[in-house]
Image: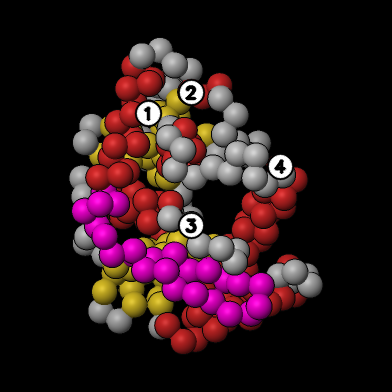
Amino acid sequence: MSIVAISGGTFDDSTHTYRDEGGVWIPSLTAILKLQGLSSYPGCIKREVMEHASERGTSGHQIAWSYAKYQDVDPSWINEELEPRYTAIKRFFAETNFKPDVDWLEQPMIATVCGMKFGVTPDALGVRGKWPQIVELKLCDAEQKSWAIQTAAQEMAYFSANRCGRAKRMAVMFKSDGKYKLCPHENHESDTATFLAALRLVYWRLNAGQKLWEREL
């Protein structure tokens, strides 16, 4: 377990738990989406499959950001399953001209939006051409609508804003066939409204005495 101090509180990277300076639990973006049913797969995917996908995603992020920083990765990180995804990662950086800000790669933070706090660890903020760009990395082959809500919340956290639209947003899928797919998120008003509705509902439940931190997410 590793608990690190961040602006406004602490982050436990082993449980992905955020707490404010007084030790009070702060809902994470992931928890908010799951609690309100925006990203869940009940009864559809076995737990071991989900856990493996999570491990693959963690490894893929490590590979992607090492390549972004150094144009190279430790060969021991690349196994047979990750090899085509690594090919897709290299193609993405070579062909899209996305330049991540290395100081903002997966930095946990506690943001405040409309007076409500939430924890979030955005994948990357960078530029693509002349535009600031929010990028969410996904090592999978199936697109999910909830990703747009993720990037909206991430942009709002970055800019300490109650809306999004200051930056371009997208998820990038690194697929098992060695290709990548860009998934732009352009409906700023709707994505903002959906996230704020989910965040307000979480805080309504907390204020009603529900111990959401005890739920398995």
State yes or no: discs 2 and 1 in contact (Cβ < 8 Å).
Answer: yes
Q: Residue furthest bottom?
A: 95
Q: Mark 1 or 4 closer to N-term? A: 4
Image disc number at residue 144: 3
The quadrant holding residue 44 is top right
State yes or no: discs 4 and 2 in contact (Cβ < 8 Å).
Answer: no
Image disc number at residue 47: 4
Q: Residue 88, percent across and down?
A: 59, 78
Query: Is 128 located above or below residue 18 in the figure?
Result: below
State whether residue 26 appears in this view: yes
Question: Left or right: 115 with respect to 9?
Answer: left
In the image, 3 versus 216, the foreground residue is: 216
Tag in front: 1 or 3: 3
The crowd level at tag 4 (other Cα within 10 Å; few <14, some 14-19, many 20+) is few
Q: CA distance from mark 3 to mark 2?
A: 24 Å
In the image, 47 versus 167, the foreground residue is: 47
Image disc number at residue 146: none
Figure quadrant of the C terminus: top right
State yes or no: discs 4 and 3 in contact (Cβ < 8 Å).
Answer: no
The quadrant holding residue 124 is bottom left
Per the image, label 3 sits on a secondary structure element best described as: loop
